[in-house]
Image: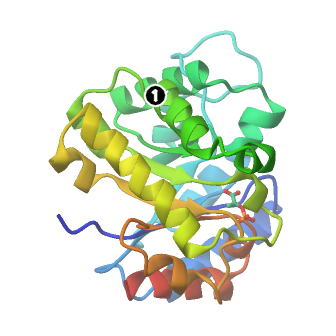
Amino acid sequence: MVRRPFVAGNWKMYKTRNDAVALAKGVASKFATPDRVDVAVCPPSIYLDAVGQAIKGSSVALGGQNMYHTTFGAFTGEVNGEMLLDVGCKYVILGHSERRQFFGDTDEFVNRKVLAALKLGLLPIVCVGETLDQRKAGQTAKVVQTQFDGSLAGLTAEQMSQVVIAYEPVWAIGTGVKAEPRQAEEVHADLRKLIESRYNAQVASSVRIQYGGSVKADNAAEMFQQPNIDGALVGGASLEVESFLKIIEAAAAK
Ligand code: PEP
């Protein structure tokens, strides 16, 4: 199966409203290859509505950076999947390492969110990845398998096919130290084998696995040359139109 590359920009807790709208408009107006690559921007939740309006009618999709797993209720400060859909989201990032590290998101919690998102028709981008200590201790495969098993427990084959996985080694996020293409490819191939052994080859070949961690305009192409790297989840380099577009163009050329 030919997987369509997918590049998503995670804006984290950056930008003011005007800057977010300008960035979204810049990306949407210059994105020239919607037939070859899927693109999403994931602004802070308070700007989802404004950014959604700014990209309306374009080929750029909208994504949330997190969600709570229940329907409406007394959960101060939270945003649920219905709300993300209501402002036009197609995707939601779940289990980002910053959520796991700073906000206590466990595999079990991420799993509840993944199941809730899928039930609503929101497509989850589920992040997994090891810390530097875990890599140095030779635990990468085990850590990623545990996160895969826990965060993606209980999904039907059809649900699994809708999930995007982002392999994001924690030591490469925001550090400027990107994984070597072959290092990342090894983990991506392992993840595909995990999907195949739980489901089947067809599901495994349909799931898109993004790489994330210091992807920049000048290093994206070498990552996308790897057979199991289907795009990128981009932090810092998604905060400017030109650098994000170059990464998108590199994915379109895959
Ligand atoms: C991320 O936030 O998911 C990420 C990969 O960040 P950066 O590209 O800045 O390393």
Q: Residue 163, image x and y in percent?
A: 37, 44
Counting from the top left corner in percent of width and height, residue 243 is at: 67, 85
> Residue sitting at 51 percent across and 16 percent down?
71
Classify residue 180 as left or right of residue 156: right
Q: Residue at x 83, y 62 (%)?
A: 16
Q: Classify mark 1 as within 8 Å of ligand 1 or not, answering yes or no.
A: no
Residue 214 location, x and y as percent?
71, 70
Residue at far front of view: 138
Quarter holding the C terminus is: bottom left
Q: Is residue 106 visible?
A: yes
Residue matched to label 1: 149
Name the quadrant where ligand 1 sits: bottom right
Q: Nearer the viewer, residue 161 or 37?
A: 161
Residue ID at (54%, 21%) = 69
User: Of helix, strand and loop, which one carries label 1?
Assistant: helix
* Front-most of residues 204 and 12: 204
In the rendered image, residue 138, in percent from the top left (x then y), is placed at 67, 46
Spot the residue most to the top: 74
Q: State how the image is colored.
A: rainbow
Q: Amino acid at mark 1?
A: Asp
Compare residues 74 and 195 and report the one nearer the observer.
195
Assign the N terminus to one quadrant of the image.
Answer: bottom left
Vertical arrangement, residue 143 with respect to residue 176, above or below: above
Give the answer, above or below, for where 76 lies relative to 40: above
The front one of 154 and 144 is 144
Crowding near the residue tagged with mark 1, few <14, some 14–19, many ≥20 C-alpha atoms within 10 Å: some
Up the image or down, 94 lies above or below 179; here it is above
Question: Residue at position x 78%, y 70% from top?
Answer: 177
Which quadrant of the structure image shows residue 171? bottom right
Q: Is residue 53 visible?
A: no
